[in-house]
Structures are given as C-alpha cells and as structure tokens.
Amino acid sequence: MDRMFNSRLIRIAMISLLCLAATALATPPEEGSAVVITDTSVDAGPPPAATLTGEFKSAYVVDADAGWPLVAYHERDRRQPASMLKMMTELLVLERIAEGDLRFEDPVTVSAKASKMGGSQVYLKQGETFTVRELLMALAIHSANDAAVALAEHLAGSVEAFIDLMNSRAERMGMADSEFHSVHGLPPGWRQEPDLTTARDLALLARELIKHPEALEWASMAHAPFRDGKFILTNPNKLVGHYRGLDGLKTGYTGPAGFCVTATAVQKGKRLISVVMGCPTDKARATESTRLLSYGFNAYVQVILVEEGGTALPALKPVKGGKRTEVPLAYASSLKVSVLRDLKDQVTLRYALPEKIEAPQPAGAVVGRAEAVLDGRVLGSVPVVTGEEIVKGSWLDRLFHR
C-alpha cells in the first residue's frame, strides 16, 4: 500500500514538474530579448578622400562599385556641365527601354525644333525618321544636340516635360546640388537659366549610366557610321583607345564650363569613375583624367573580405526555441572594399549578430550583418543570413535545450 502511494506521489510530482516547465516555456520572452546586436557606434563611411590639385576647378574619383570617394577637390562646387549633362538624357531613355516603354528600333520623327539646334550635331532635318538606337548613338558618341532634343520630345512629348523628368530622376539619385534646364548642356539663351551640377553629382549619374552596357559600348567607340555611312560619328574623348581599360564616358565643353570629362576605366577587375570640371584646354582634361585615374588604381587596392555570397561563417550560432541548438550562418553576398594600399592589412571583419537566433526562421533570413572596419570606420557591410531553416522546437525540445 505504501509502495503504491509513493509511486502515485512520484508520478504526480513528475507530471507537475513537466507542466510547470511547459508553462514556463510557453511564456513569451520579454520584448526585444531575442535580438541583442553588438555595439556598432562608429563613424560610417570610408576614410577621407585624398585632395589633389591640378589644372581643374573641381575633381572627383570614386570606386564605381561602392561609390566611395578616392580623390575629392571642390567636388560640391556647382558648375555648368556642358555636354556631360547628356548622360542624364541618355540614362532616361535607356531606363525606359529597360522598362519596356520604348524599343531601340522605335522610329523617331525629327521636329522643327530638333532640326534647328546648333553646336555639335548630326544635321537632322525636319520630318526625317531615325531609330531610337541611331539617335542614342549620335548622342553618346558624337554628343549631338539635335539628337538629344529629338529623343527628349519622343520620350516625354516636349523638351520641357523631359527636363522635369531629368530633375526628378536627379533628386531620386541623390544629386542634391544639381538643377537642369536643358537636355543638351549648351549655354543658356536669353531669359534661360544655366544647367548646374557638381563633380560629385556627375559621378553619381555615371554610376547609374554604366549599369546599361550599351552606354559603355558606345562611349568606347572612336568612330561609328550614321546615315548609312554617309556621316561619321566622331568621339571627342581623346582618352578612348589611349588609356588602358578606359571605356567611357562623356566629355563637355563650353566657354563658361571649360573643358570637362567624366571618365571610367577598369583595371585588374576594379572600375573607377573620374570627373574633372573647368580644365583650361582639351589636353589638360585628358592629362588630368589620366593622372587621377592612375592615382586611384595605384594608391588604392581592393580588399576582399568575403569572396562570394553563400560562404559560411566560421562558427555555428546558438538557437533559442528551436528543434536544434545551433544553426549555420552565411554571408548574403561578397564584401569588397577599396583602401589605401598601405592600410590593407588593417581592415578587419566585425559581426553585428544577436546572441541567439530566435526560432522559427526560414533559410536565407537576414539575422545580422558583417562589417568591414578600418580605424573605427565601417567601410562596407554585407547581410548575414541563416544557412538553413530553423524549425521551432516542441516544448519538450525547448525544455532539454535550456
């Protein structure tokens, strides 16, 4: 009898203990307790860019991938861009083509307004018809003002409406110091406002334009046929074919603007973008662009922190409330940063992750980030994701995983 009574007491005690444990596990955690991010209170962004002077009023060199400045000199001084403005005209048309609203082979009929444009031109005549592709090539290679007007009218219905699109796109792109009043960059006429932008803003624009392979294809051509070969498009960019890896992007010249060029080149897998404004001569803009690009390629080196997306982190991470106690994590993408060559060994990888990963989570869920850090500055970061699905455990799993 005593043994039966004691056995019953033991069973009751065990059941009570399990019930209490289940109740405790079912109680939701305090708000915010699941994610505790390590301290990241550092200055964001790359180290300060180098300041180089030369035969220019302003200059800017950036890493095309990350957009970080390598060289900066009066990069936010507002100046007239001359024909470098046509990069925005080209970008808007290429974006509409990418979206499917336009096609390269769509016909464009030349208006009277387009046919009367001066400066650099391909001598369009009112009523003539060309394809969007033909006019884009005339714009990108020959810097044709009449082609710019014809494309603007075709896309937006009028030059004025197209200019509104230009300014809207510039604002969305972060070109905070730019205002556009034309589609070609010619000096303003009577009662017209000048186009104004900066070397920094032009670099932002160039980073968007080079996402379209046609832009680099055309900008790297020294010559191309037009009107079935009766007219030859000529690229005014003297760097084309004379600087290793250079494949663009756009020159400009007017009296108020001086000689300008936005250039881009690739060497050893690294693309840089250089902008010089206000050079005194055509030779000076070519010489200065070459000097700045060469400085960037030689003074800075690419440090690869994460080779490719999907690479596993070196250690498993504890799981809270899961069927398993640990989970593998992975980098969502590669992580590469550009730094001065003599600082490359000082770049470290730091993690901002919760102490435990809260279950449940699907595979590929973002749970934190990895940061490339140099001298207290975050140079870049990449999301850290779950390497597999984290299944929520039963109350019994959670009891034994406590």
Image (cartoon, rainbow, N blue to C red):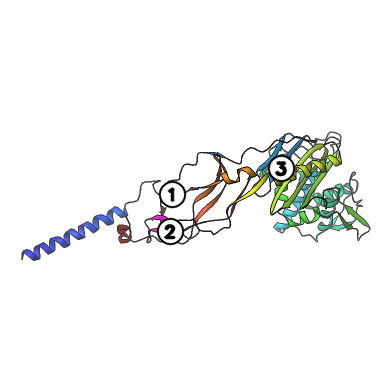
Tell which tag, 3 or 1, sits nearer the viewer.
3
Query: What distance separates the C-alpha of mark 3 from that of mark 1?
Result: 37 Å
33 with respect to 140 (left or right): left
The secondary element bearing badge 3 is classed as strand
Quadrant for the N terminus, please: bottom left
Q: Is residue 318 magenta?
A: yes
Is residue 303 located in the magenta-colored stretch of the structure? Answer: no
The residue wearing badge 2 is 327
Q: Amino acid at mark 1?
A: Pro
Q: Vertically, is 232 above or below 340?
A: below
Q: How many marks?
A: 3
CA distance separating discs 1 and 2: 13 Å
| Place of residue 140 in the rendered image (x, y in percent of width and height, measured from the top left) | 81, 51
* Residue identifier under label 1: 354
Q: Nearer the viewer, residue 61 or 101?
A: 61
Q: Which residues are magenta?
A: 316-336
Report the residue marked by disc 3: 61
x and y, in percent, of residue 53 in the image = 75, 34
Identify the residue shown where x is 54% and y is 56%: 332
Chain-order first, disc 3 or disc 1: 3
